[in-house]
Amino acid sequence: MIMYFKRKAYDKLIEWKLNYADSYAVLLEGARRVGESTIAKLFAENEYKSYILIDFSIASTDILSCFDEVQLFPRARQAIKHLVKDGRYHYIETGSLISIKKNVKDILIPSEEMKITVYSMDYEEFCNATGNNYHLIKQLFDMKKAVGQEVNRKLMRDMRIYMAVGGIPQAVEAYVNGNNFSTIDNVKRQIIYLYEEDFKKIDPSGKISALYHSIPAQLAKDQKKYRMSTALKKRTTIKEEELLFDLFDSKTVLPCYNSTDPKVSLTSTKDLNSYKLYLSDTGLFVTLMFIDRPITENEIYAKLLSDKLPANLGYLYENLMAQLLASKDRELYYHTWEKENSTHYYEIDFLISERSKISAIEVKSSGLGKHDSLCEFAKKYSKHIKNCYVFSQKDYKQEKGKQFMPMYLAPFL
């Protein structure tokens, strides 16, 4: 029996149907296995009297013969322009970005096509699926008051469960069905292997896979930026650098760019040569951290859930923050600058625009520790800052112009 989860992309399809469907087809795009096809099918069943589903991976020869070389569907996509103009049907397309990119070189992309990005299930969707009270957490965010050690500990454990499981619907379904974490980990491994097979369709050499697998290790080293040469263990050529954009297009990763002068504009000061990479799903990130072993044991997950892994997991919580921000359709930015008379540097983990100003975010894995970079940033850009946040596992407090928040409040930024 297929388990259906409430997804926000469904609500976006409702808006499309009401306001745009007579003039535009809609393309649900995202990484493999984030639920595009399930959402489209459920929407068609619920919101229309009848629908026709054509899956080109299993369609009959008669259907395939309606289009020239449609085995991988590019001609069908090109035909959308005329089908929309015909006006008798509404059209929803689905596909992973790798398959889309691989097969559009020789076709005209229709202007009569809207796009909706489908992400892994965000924390609200995860809470709805698992029975957690997301609206209560929203009330805590609005209150901006400490909740006490016991409540905070419970809510942080719930958030760590989300980190461990992730938001891929198959993994969430396995968790809801009561499977142990080793079983859930195996589900996630199969998805990573599927991604690797997709990468090989674009790049048989395996270099895109190497770029993908290098992400946790590079974040763990706390480097100023992602280095392709580290992942490939050699100096990179221009052709190899182009593979990075194929990885971006797969939607399996989240690029976070250095904003060189955040007081002006995050977008206009984006440094395309200075970026970090995060995985689009933190549950897959956890599995990739332990991909060297045949299976990640329940014991490892138990230590993660109880916050007892013998490692500084700041980079894991950074990945979680990246996913939470990206699920709000935010581009990701950070900022780094050198200390005076020193080879060291300051760094702000994330920057977000809030109205006409910017807010700075620092992420800690456990204790609050020092936050020199945030203090210096507040001095440097005082006229342009709306808020300074420090996210960790600690309870809420406000001190010296900074808001210290537990990670479970991050979805409400």
Image (tube, rainbow, N blue to C red):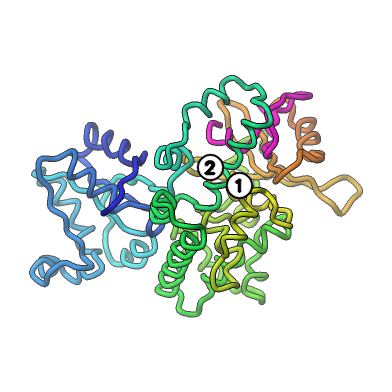
Is-magenta flag for residue 86? Answer: no
Q: Which of 394 and 97 is in front in this view?
A: 394
Give x and y (percent) for residue 143.
Answer: 59, 19
- Disc 1 designates what residue? 270
Magenta range is: 386-413
Amino acid under label 2? Leu
Report crowding for label 2: few under 14, some 14 to 19, many 20 or more residues within 10 A (C-alpha): many
| Dots 2, 1 in contact, CB < 8 A | no
- Disc 2 designates what residue? 324
Is-magenta flag for residue 398? Answer: yes
Give x and y (percent) for residue 390.
Answer: 70, 35
Judged from this view, the residue extending furthest toward the bottom is: 205
Report crowding for label 1: few under 14, some 14 to 19, many 20 or more residues within 10 A (C-alpha): many
Against 104, residue 379 (above or below) is above
Among the 4 quarters of the image, the one containing residue 410: top right
Q: Residue at x 53, y 42 (%)?
A: 324
Give x and y (percent) for residue 236.
Answer: 62, 73
Against 263, residue 35 (above or below) is below
Locate the C terminus and report the quarter of the image it occupies.
top right
Amino acid under label 1? Lys
Instruction: Label 2, secondary structure: give it.
Output: helix
Locate the N terminus and report the quarter of the image it occupies.
bottom left
Q: Residue at x 51, y 58 (%)?
A: 181
